[in-house]
Amino acid sequence: MLRLVAFAVAAGLALAGVQPVVSAMTGEVAMSWAFSLTAPAVLTAAVVFGAGRILNRDDMVQPPWYSAWLLLPGSFLLAGAAAMCIFGALVEFTLIPSTMWVLLVTGGLLWMAAMVLVRSHSR
């Protein structure tokens, strides 16, 4: 179940991250605006997915019962970054990129720290 959650967070961020490029292809926003949102979102999704794969120890161990509580803050912040990508696909508002960067950095760090804690406390 934990692997499914780790994949879903990375996949959701990556899918939302490409929305500005799709919007730019239809002429809704500028291509430079789209890439300024897409590149960091997809890169963060790749790092989150890669960290999950590296820290994976298969089914040899069981994660602790509080795993979801550890992963919750990071996943919500990464979902907020995904929402900024979707908003950025609709309008070019100057506050969107800086908000997305803050959400990506804090969410990515919290998510990876939680994954390290969950994996190190698994028995």
Image (cartoon, helix red, strand yellow):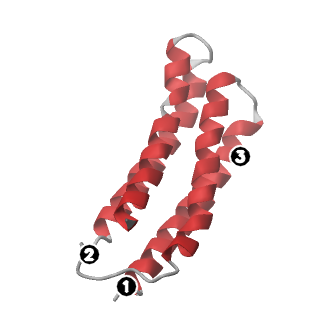
Residue 105, picture quadrant? bottom right
101 relative position to 21: left or right:
right
- The residue singled out by tag 2 in the image is 57
Q: Depth check: give the residue in front, 84 or 65.
A: 65
> From mark 2 to mark 3, how far is it between C-alphas?
34 Å
Image quadrant in which the N terminus is located: bottom left
- The residue singled out by tag 3 in the image is 99
Image quadrant in which the C terminus is located: bottom left
Amino acid carrying label 3: it is Thr
Q: Residues within 10 Å of mark 2 (few under 14, many from 20)?
A: few
- The residue mark sitting in front, 1 or 3, is 1
User: Is residue 92 shown to the viewer in this render?
Assistant: yes
- The residue singled out by tag 1 in the image is 122
**Residue at (63% x, 56% y) in the render:** 77
**Residue at (48% x, 82% y) in the render:** 65
Ranked by sequence position, the earlier of labels 1 and 2 is 2
Instruction: Estimate the x, y position of residue 54 in percent, counting from the top left.
Output: 29, 67
Ranked by sequence position, the earlier of labels 2 and 3 is 2
Amino acid carrying label 2: it is Arg
**Residue at (57% x, 10% y) in the render:** 27
Residue at disc 2, secondary structure = loop
**Residue at (64% x, 53% y) in the render:** 103
Ranked by sequence position, the earlier of labels 1 and 3 is 3
98 relative position to 57: left or right:
right
> From mark 1 to mark 2, how far is it between C-alphas?
10 Å
Instruction: Estimate the x, y position of residue 74 in percent, counting from the top left.
Output: 58, 63
Instruction: Estimate the x, y position of residue 81 in percent, counting from the top left.
Output: 61, 46
Q: Residues within 10 Å of mark 3 (few under 14, many from 20)?
A: few
